[in-house]
Image (cartoon, rainbow, N blue to C red):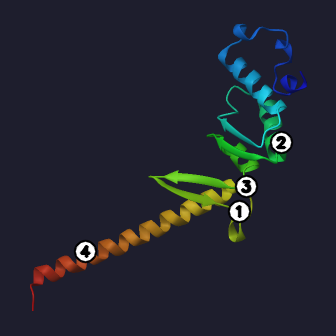
Amino acid sequence: EAMLDRLGMAALVDSRTDELSGGQAKRVALARLLCGEYEALILDEPTNHLDLDAIKFLEEWLAAYRGGLVLVTHDRHVLDRVTTKVLEIDRGTAYLHMPVGKHAGSGYAAYLAGRAEREERAEAAEQVRKNLAVKELAWLRRGAP
């Protein structure tokens, strides 16, 4: 019951699950999950249907959780407050971002910095490729010596 209260569900403690809305059912399932003891959790958009107090509680709970966590979310604030590592999958390639050195802070901050650096390197490489193509085209137009 305490977990339901923390997730804003105290008024529904005596309700039947088949009487709950989709959002309420999801919060009940999340409360049940958070009451268990697991080595790892996989959470898909856990902040959906939660109010701000419940999101804050969930952030604190996840930050203190010592097991493995796979978190799929678009909530950047939760990512910033909870993650220590971010695994990005982009066009079939996986990139691991960890807060080290100049990227100290959250895993999400490291992800943002790492992605920006990778995009800058890709843009620089593309510019080199374009410059080479322009030079080779000019050489072709001049003709072979």
Instruction: Name the residue located 83 percent from the left edge and 42 percent from the top edge.
Output: 60
What percent of the width, then of the height, locates residue 80? 71, 50
The residue labelled by disc 2 is 60
Dot placed on the residue nearer the N-terminal end, 2 or 4: 2
Find residue 117 and report its image quarter: bottom right
Dot placed on the residue nearer the N-terminal end, 3 or 2: 2
Q: Residues within 10 Å of mark 3 (few under 14, many from 20)?
A: some
CB contact under 8 Å: marks 3 and 1: yes
* Type of amino acid under label 2: Glu
Residue 74 lies, with reference to residue 114, above or below; the image says: above
Helix, strand or loop for disc 2: helix
Which label lies toward us, 2 or 4?
2
Find residue 126 and report its image quarter: bottom left
Left or right of residue 135, residue 63 in this image: right
Helix, strand or loop for disc 1: loop
The residue labelled by disc 4 is 133
* Type of amino acid under label 3: Thr
* Type of amino acid under label 4: Ala
Mark 2 vs mark 4, CA separation in Å: 53 Å
Which label lies toward us, 4 or 3?
3
Mark 3 vs mark 2, CA separation in Å: 14 Å
Mark 4 vs mark 1, CA separation in Å: 38 Å
The residue labelled by disc 1 is 99
